[in-house]
Image (tube, rainbow, N blue to C red):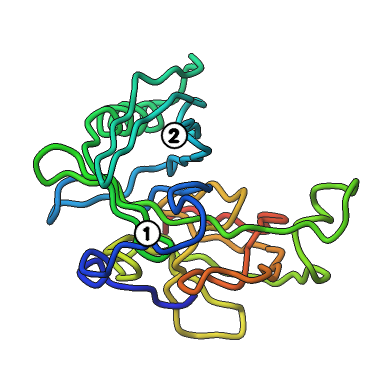
Amino acid sequence: MKRLLSLSTLLLAPLAFAQPGNPLEGDWTLLISGNYGKLQELAPAPTLRIQGKQLSGFSGCNRYSGTFSAKGTQFKVNPLASTKMACEPRPSKTEQAYFKAMQGVMRYQVSNNTLVLYTKGSGMLVFTRNPKIEAKTLNTAPEAAITSVAPDTQILLVGPKKVDCTGMVPMKCLQVRTPEQTNWEFFYQSIEGFAYEEGFTYKLRVRVEDVKNPPADASSKRYILVEVLEKNPPK
């Protein structure tokens, strides 16, 4: 639950071209998008994987894939292909907004573990790099291979609404606390497998795993839903 860089710090930071290999490559999750000053979260959060000149990911509704070209800081996404699964209105709206923005990307910036794709005008898509989880051994079940230490579990209480917070960029954070705590804390990351619905309070059992060698601006912990113990409607 650590605070990350502000958006102004991010955009003024030097470009990370000195990194070994291609700094674009890897797995990314969209934090916010829109025009500067009117940035918003898209939910479910789209993802982006870049390998060579190939890109793929989750649009919020469907899986997609395609190619891109990059020269210097210029970046152009070629027409994308996607699956055709029907979704609820909110994921469908997320997908439409994401695809429209992606097809309008003109340039990019990589700073530390943040990727910003700039679209026409003042539009942008701000991604954070996903931590690379290394398997301890080969040929083992996925659940047992994603952490270098034995997983731990804990109980988290989740508040009924997200609140404004400033991490790497202005964003909306869950409010969480343990049963022993009285004050809510900002939760700057996601709980994998947890489908949050605003207006409800939750009591969750989560598995907490150490991330081996996390990026400097990322959490050293990974939270995975084990069980929803309580889901209480608005009073």
Q: Nearer the viewer, residue 94 or 185?
A: 94
Residue type marked 2: Gly
| Residues under numbered marks 1 and 2 in contact, where contact means CB atoms less than 8 Å apart | no
Q: Mark 2 points at which residue?
A: 60
In this rendering, is residue 214 above or below 41? below
The crowd level at tag 2 (other Cα within 10 Å; few <14, some 14-19, many 20+) is many
Q: Where is residue 1 in the image (x, y as percent from the top left)?
A: 49, 75
The numbered dot on residue 169 is none
Q: Where is residue 120 in the image (x, y as percent from the top left)?
A: 13, 37
Residue at the image position 51 percent from the left and 53 percent from the top: 21
Pair 1/2: label in front: 1
Q: Earlier in the sequence, mark 1 or mark 2?
A: 1
Q: Where is residue 157 in the image (x, y as percent from the top left)?
A: 56, 69
Q: Which of 73 and 7 is in front in this view?
A: 73
The crowd level at tag 1 (other Cα within 10 Å; few <14, some 14-19, many 20+) is some
Q: Mark 1 points at which residue?
A: 17
